Image (cartoon, grey):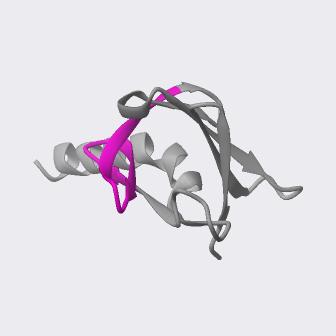
């Protein structure tokens, strides 16, 4: 029984592991329609949270997701050390860029 539970725990962590790069708070430029968003994991899905609400985003490729509620692309950008440093949300012809808080 312990082995089965341990296997389930490792399976969940393995599924969430790749999403951990994206988790955190992102701050947008003053005057942006969105001041900040946070990224969390719920039920093995990446969820974007803002003052406008929370919704899961769908992975399309490496570092690229789709926010169906707003028909928006969500693209994560990485620094030289391969860590996520920014998120760009492309919606209604605008590109909103938020810097990850460290």
Q: Position of residue 22 (x, y in %)?
A: 56, 53
Left or right of 92, for residue 5:
left
Residue extending furthest toward the top: 60
Q: Please tell me which residue lies in front, 71 or 87.
A: 71
Check residue 60 for magenta coloring. Answer: no
Q: Position of residue 60 (x, y in %)?
A: 55, 23
Q: Please tell me which residue lies in front, 13 or 30.
A: 30
The range drawn in magenta is: 40-59
Residue extending furthest toward the bottom: 102
What residue is drawn where x is 66% and y is 39%? 94
- Depicted 68 relative to depicted 42: above or below: above
Q: Position of residue 19 (x, y in %)?
A: 50, 47
Q: What quarter of the picture does the C terminus occupy? A: bottom right
Left or right of 68, for residue 75:
right
Left or right of 98, for residue 72:
left
Residue extending furthest toward the front: 31
Check residue 52 for magenta coloring. Answer: yes
The image quarter in which residue 52 lies: bottom left
What residue is drawn where x is 45% and y is 62%? 38
Q: What count of labels does the image hold?
A: 0
Residue extending furthest toward the left: 1
Q: Please tell me which residue lies in front, 50 or 63.
A: 50
Q: Position of residue 28 (x, y in %)?
A: 62, 64
Q: Main secondary structure of the magenta part?
A: strand
- Depicted 97 relative to depicted 65: above or below: below
What residue is drawn where x is 18% and y is 49%? 5
- Depicted 8 relative to depicted 97: above or below: above
């Amino acid at each position: 029984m312990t082995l089965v539970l341990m296997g389930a725990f490792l399976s969940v962590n393995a599924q969430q592991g790749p999403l951990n790069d994206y988790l955190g708070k992102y701050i947008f430029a003053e005057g942006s329609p969105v001041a900040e968003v946070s990224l969390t994991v719920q039920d093995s899905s990446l969820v974007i949270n803002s003052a406008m609400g929370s919704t899961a985003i769908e992975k399309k490729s490496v570092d690229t997701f789709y926010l169906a509620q707003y028909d928006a692309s969500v693209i994560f950008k990485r620094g030289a050390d391969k860590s996520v440093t920014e998120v760009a949300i492309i919606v209604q012809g605008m590109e909103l860029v938020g810097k990850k808080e460290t």
